[in-house]
Amino acid sequence: MAVKLDRTAPPPAGELRPFRFPAFVKRPIPGGPTVYASRVAGIPLVSLELSSRAGAHHDPVERPGLATFTASLIDEGTRHRGSLEIAAWMERLGGYLVSAADWDTGYVAAAMLTQNVDSGLELLAEIALTPTFPEKEIERIRRQRLAELMRRGYDPGAQADDRLSEVIYGGTPYASPLLGRVESLSVVDRDALVAFYERHYSLAGSTVIAVGDLDPDDIVHRIEEALVARPGQEPAPAASPIHPVPLDGVSIHIVDRPGAAQTELRLGHAGVPRTHPEWVPLNVLNMVLGGKFTSRINLNLRERHSYTYGANSRFSGRLGPGPFVVDTAVATESAGAATREVLGELQRIREEPVEPYELEETLSYMIGVYPYTLQTMGDVAKRLEILSVYGLPDDHYDTYLDRLAAVTREDLLKGARGHLHPDRIAIVAVGPADVLVPQLEGIGEVTVRRREPELAAV
Amino acid sequence: MTLTTSEPISHLGLQLPFERATLSNGLRVVLHPDRSLPLVTVNLWYHVGSKNERPGRTGFAHLFEHMLFQGSEHVPANEHFRYLQQVGGVANGSTWYDRTNYYETLPAHHLDLGLWLESDRMGFFLPALTQESLDTQRNVVMNERRQRVDNQPYGRANERMHELLYPGDHPYHWPVIGYMDDIAAATLEEVRQFFQTYYAPNNAVLTLAGDLDPDAAFKRVEAWFGDIPAGPPVPPVSAPLSPLGGERREVLEDDVSLPRIYLGFRGPAYGQRGWYAADLLSGVFSGGKSSVLYRDLVYERQIAQDVSAWMSPYEAVATFMIVATAKPGIAIETLEQAILDHVERAASAPPAAADFERSRNRMLTELYSGLQKLDNRADLFSQFTTYFDDPAGVAAEADRYLEIAPRELSDYASRWMTEAERVVVTVVPRKAS
């Protein structure tokens, strides 16, 4: 029997149910890794990850891609097992194994059924501690990566990202894609890979993250037995600072794609490191500006002007000052107008405090959505990795919601004035230059480039 | 090292309790309690997709999905997302050949908000409909098409594959997002008719999952949805299909650097035994370095940059696809022949025990991994109820894979993956002008 309801306004909420970040143990092993372990029940799977200070941050400027190249070789052969044997063993059990690097870390990660965790850990240790870097696999992966770069040069979204990084971060490791560049991938040899591994994959100073259907104390004990550091191994060096040269005005960088159906558009400049004291308020600021569907930039570009299917912005958390980027793809004839609207939004949020309702709605979104972002083993593991990589305190997540709730409109205004720079920004447009130049030349100095020139060399 | 013997992964003790009921207006309701996090998902499937469109009017179901976020009688335009986001909700919708879904995951104490929003657009959508919002969303969707299809490397290949695989009047012939001219031509009157034909409670399934008490939650559903009138019976879709009776091929030029090949075959509908055999075969072919096609084409011979195979879960007839990108300097014909050799081998003998086992275990771990997220789980309950009227199918899905014997994979390949029934689309770099 249906009861008559008031449909004219949102119904009242029920009673709030509490949520806490999952409990975890943190155990530093002397001379070895620090272990973070957390039990996430429900599904009989375990994920294990060994993470080292071996990200692309550590690439020598003249050797972009060295870190990710090294990482991709770690699961390609050990003293006891060849590349296919390693893969077949893990895959046969329905598990997966990956060895890769991002900006901050190099990692070997595996997920497996709980019943196979002992042998999974043993394999992980063998791979991480005794990789042999076979010449045959190095050459295969080199060809694979060069072809990937070639393909990337034809992907308009990737072209836009890469051009922006190049403009913002010239002369630093952040200027190149994680994958590297043709000239460096072509010359890196086995010695360089082994040297990078030896220097950056020390167990001392590394981190192991174990999450899933496990007993935290028990897994710490097993990890301690499986991952034994070589005596006297030095910890990997900490990341040296990255200082991009600040931009000195508004510059437009067009990558010409004659006849393209749409234009990929990016606006950006260097942001702040993940450890910056204003990280939380800056993320709230970004959420008002471009971090969710109802943010200013998306409502403006999509719902008000229908220039695009979607537009968003973000600060990227890294050890160094990762980029602040506004990202969208627009109908080419709207590229100039869309650019002006974005610059206008960046200016407006620097001039006046956000409306009280905007802050209130944004904070209640970020607080309310928190449990949603912690549903899977991977979600929890990612958060533990953040604690370790950025050296955040153990109670970081317990205090997070309170720190969020304390953010004020004044904090956002200060953050916008200090860290958004619509007058010192790079604008990248990948699309037909003949249609784009007339629209954009009034906004800043325009340079036009054809496809990445280095790709012709592949 | 002691290698663990690989018992088939089965019956891992997963609990997927549910209750179901049907309202007097025909709305089918599934309730899945799981109190591990203070979240609740509201997941609503309408049994309408691009399959229900007709030639010349394609893309309509998807455009309509956008319109359903433009407000209803009691929810002003653009406020749907705002109401949800301001309490920490995450929401979206999607359109597919066979269905359209709408979903939001909320802090559990806001369950009523989700029910209010979904029931308002099911029962009170038309009063809010305006020409202005249709104009805006038409442009947004045209930009979506440019972003996902026209401006994507290889973006047209999938569309072309379906056009060749299914005849012009078959409902899987045209793309879900539709053709540009058709999107531009959509009218307000069509939006109205589409709503009245398909968006009624008797053509929908509602799943609530998460931190809820099934009895109390069902009472809330009755309160919000119980007085929405049933609609007329939904017109059936007919999808007769005669065999292709001869290979079809096409070469597309695109702004790409590496050629790519797409091989497509029709197969039995999702839910049939043969579908699971095909899915297992796709896992024998690709997915992981030790899979048959990856191992041979990418790792050993290095003639492919990548390769993947999959079986699509369509309701009327499924599509088995194999896609591979050539390495620089490798002729696409060489790659095609290598793949066809594997297809022939798959038809002539069952897969090796290790390959079969790897595929099966991967399917199962993926299934279990996917169940970690509440919104995925709710979506599966809606899916099994919409297609098969069987929410228990979610928990039984693992058994469907475990029932298949290796021999069924070769039987499948020899029956369905023949030369006369295949479509080959290759994408090659556009010649410099």
Image (cartoon, coloured by chain):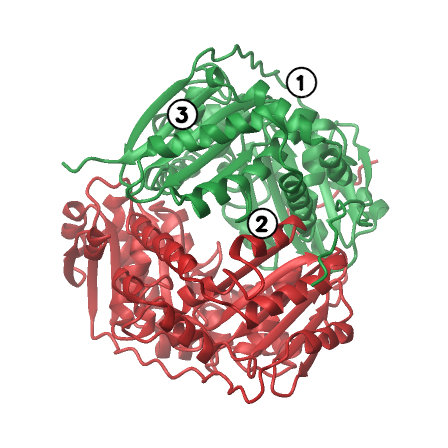
Chain colours: A red, B green
Look at mark 3 in the image and give the residue it sits on: B424
Q: Position of residue A438 (x, y in %)?
A: 14, 51
Q: Secondary structure at mark 2?
A: strand
Mark 3 against mark 2, which lies toward the viewer? Answer: 3
Query: Quick one: label 1 or label 3, which is nearer the N terminus?
Result: 1
Q: Is residue B408 above or below residue A368?
A: above
Query: Quick one: label 2 or label 1, which is nearer the N terminus?
Result: 2
- Residue count near mark 1 (Cα–Cα under 10 Å), binned few <14, some 14–19, many ≥20: few
Q: Position of residue B302 (x, y in %)?
A: 39, 45
Q: Secondary structure at mark 1?
A: loop
Mark 1 against mark 3, which lies toward the viewer? Answer: 3
Residue type at mark 2: give it: Ala
Q: Position of residue B405 (x, y in %)?
A: 72, 31
The Cα atoms of the two marked residues, 3 and 2, are separated by 38 Å
Residue type at mark 1: give it: Pro
> In screen coordinates, is B385 left or right of A282?
right
Residue A34 location, quadrant? bottom right
What residue lies at 45% left-to-right and 59% top-to-bottom? A295
Residue type at mark 3: give it: Val
Look at mark 2 in the image and give the residue it sits on: B91
> In screen coordinates, is B28 left or right of A55?
right
Residue B233: mark in rendering: 1
